[in-house]
Image (spheres, grey):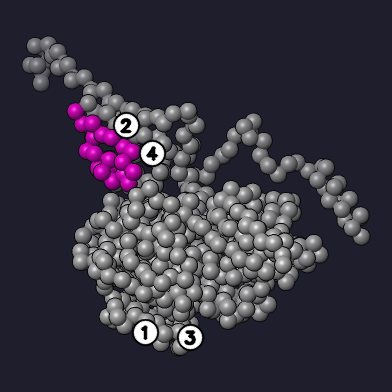
Amino acid sequence: MTDANQIAILPGELLPNVLKMRAEEYRLIQICSTRTKEGFDLVYSFGKEYDMTNLIFSVGEDDEVISISDIFPPAFLYENEIHDLFGINIKMMNVDYKGNLYRLSQKTPYKNI
Amino acid sequence: MATRSIVPFGPQHPVLPEPIHLDLVLEDETVVEAIPSIGFIHRGLEKLVEKKDFNEYVYVAERICGICSFMHGMGYCEAVEHVMGIEIPDRAKYLRTIWCEMSRIHSHLLWLGLLADGFGFESLFMESWRMREKILDMFEYSTGGRVIFSVNKIGGQRKDMDDEMIRNFVTILSGMEKDLRLLARTFLDDYAVKSRLQGVGILTAQQAHDLGAVGPFMRASGIALDTRKRGYAAYGDLDFEPIISNIGDSYARTDVRINEIFQSIDLIRQAAAKIPAGEVAVPVKGFPKGEYFMRVEQPRGEALYYVRSNGTKFLERMRVRTPTFANLPGLIEVLKGCQLADVPILILTIDPCISCTER
Amino acid sequence: MSVISFSRTILKNLFSKPVTRLYPAVPREYPARTRGQIGIDIDSCIFCGICSKKCPTGAITVDKAATSWSIERFGCIQCGACTEVCPKKCLSMLTNYTDPQPKKSVDLYTKTPAEPEKPVEVSPAEKKEQ
């Protein structure tokens, strides 16, 4: 139970669903990732008024995820963060820090459990 | 063709409370673009869930930030309590509400002082912080600490406030209201203050929605959303409306925060009148299994706590999305077109709490 | 007028005492719940080690064989978890803070084992009476 609408999607369906959120005037709340044995579980949260809708899907360690920062501009911070901490491969971010958002001595510290 | 130069701002700067770095691209004295750079205070607190079990993690969650400390502990506890299906007693909910609102008053008074210091009005900074000392004394009297309280635990609260203490606090706060009105008059009516704040850094409602701004930053642009209306803790029983302003400049943000202080004093009065008797904690058995998203209204905006667990005593994932992280794109937008001397004021009007942002 | 109202403020400030406390000449009085540092009544301690297990930072070390209890003063976060779980209630939260020091310090408390009681000598006359 999460007090929000959970919608499970396939990784390839991310962009059409995000465009639908944009058309329905949702705002981006956060992007979160969790390390699992097979790869990562990603959660994209969108909100409208007081409701929240989550898009959840899983990717493998080397899979590519297309960035949503052209649809929702504030997404670049969250995507750079999960790229720096987890090592998830995100393509086509509109502002790309190339791994330097957090100054870490050990790269991708959250990737290894 | 004006020449462009890049001026680095931060991480050490007398006006910033915490380290953030901005590369400002200037054309003469006007800022054209700003590129933020964070990460100076990243402590990796989210990774500590692997080492501290879910009960001990409350102490880590409280120490994410010094100003919003109580609400971080409370948000974490509420998320785990929802995962485990624990219903805390009503008295604990009211105590959490009272301490939350006191935290909000203390944070806004701190911010007012920093804003006054930001445009050089040091005596106003000292006056705001002198009033804040009364709130810190109330915290020490009830919880034992001025900044870090350690009163939250999974299942309720560790300390109780008896009715006499609560009545005492309401009396002190009512006495403070008169001094606060004098302070508010200076902030909102003084000519020198108004000339620094009015018309500076305008954010329209459509921009605030698209850039995902939260909290007073968003409410000052006209969007009337306040996460407290969702009814967590005891807010469902209290009567209040989100405070908004339609102008969207720095003056409006100051106005919204000052009015929120008065609203918080009123909420504490309402909660003190309605608080039921009873115990303040329930025992906790077993381990959490499941996941939950909890949203809490911190003084700076909406914070989100995501907890995921698999039945052992260590959580799998604990994520905090803090309000300043969501306000950073709005800051970059607001900085475009302003003068270089206005940059510190604009950074302060989003109420930056960088240690929350980078955990 | 501003001259008149300001002279009122000047006169008020000239003849009232300062708002701030003249510390350290006037010592600070802490409220009863202040979490300053952990104190122990070493004579009641049974060295079970529960406080050491519950401490979130690992600041407490308990040695049963040597009957000693030590705490790293600068590792303690004054959370009070140890005071809540102690079965003999010999730990308490004191209201004064640890003094500043140039190096991190460890406070060690040892319990000297009590001497066994000498048997009381009873004369044969008293024994007959008993």
The residue that label 4 is drawn on is C75
Amino acid at dot 2: Ser
- Disc 3 element: loop
Amino acid at dot 3: Glu
Give percent across and percent down for residue A13: 31, 83
Asked whether residue A70 appears in the rendered view, the answer is yes
* Quadrant in which residue B119 is drawn: bottom right
The residue that label 3 is drawn on is A25
Compute the Cα span from label 3 to label 4.
49 Å
Give percent across and percent down for residue A28: 45, 76
Check if mark 3's residue and mark 4's residue have beta carbons within 8 Å: no
- Disc 2 element: strand
Amino acid at dot 1: Asn
* Quadrant in which residue A68 is drawn: bottom left
**In this rendering, do the residues under marks 4 and 1 share a single chain?**
no
For image coordinates 52% across by 49% down, the residue present is B146
Give percent across and percent down for residue B50: 27, 54
- Find the magenta span and give its range: C46-65
Compute the Cα span from label 3 to label 2.
60 Å
The residue that label 1 is drawn on is A17
Of marks 2 and 4, which one's residue comes earlier in the chain? 2
Depth order, front residue of B59/B209: B209
Residue A89 drawn above or below residue C5: below
Tell me which chain the residue with mark 1 is part of: A
Give percent across and percent down for residue B184: 72, 64
Tell me which chain the residue with mark 4 is part of: C
Image quadrant occupied by the N terminus of chain C? bottom right
The residue that label 2 is drawn on is C70
Compute the Cα span from label 1 to label 3.
13 Å
Tell me which chain the residue with mark 3 is part of: A
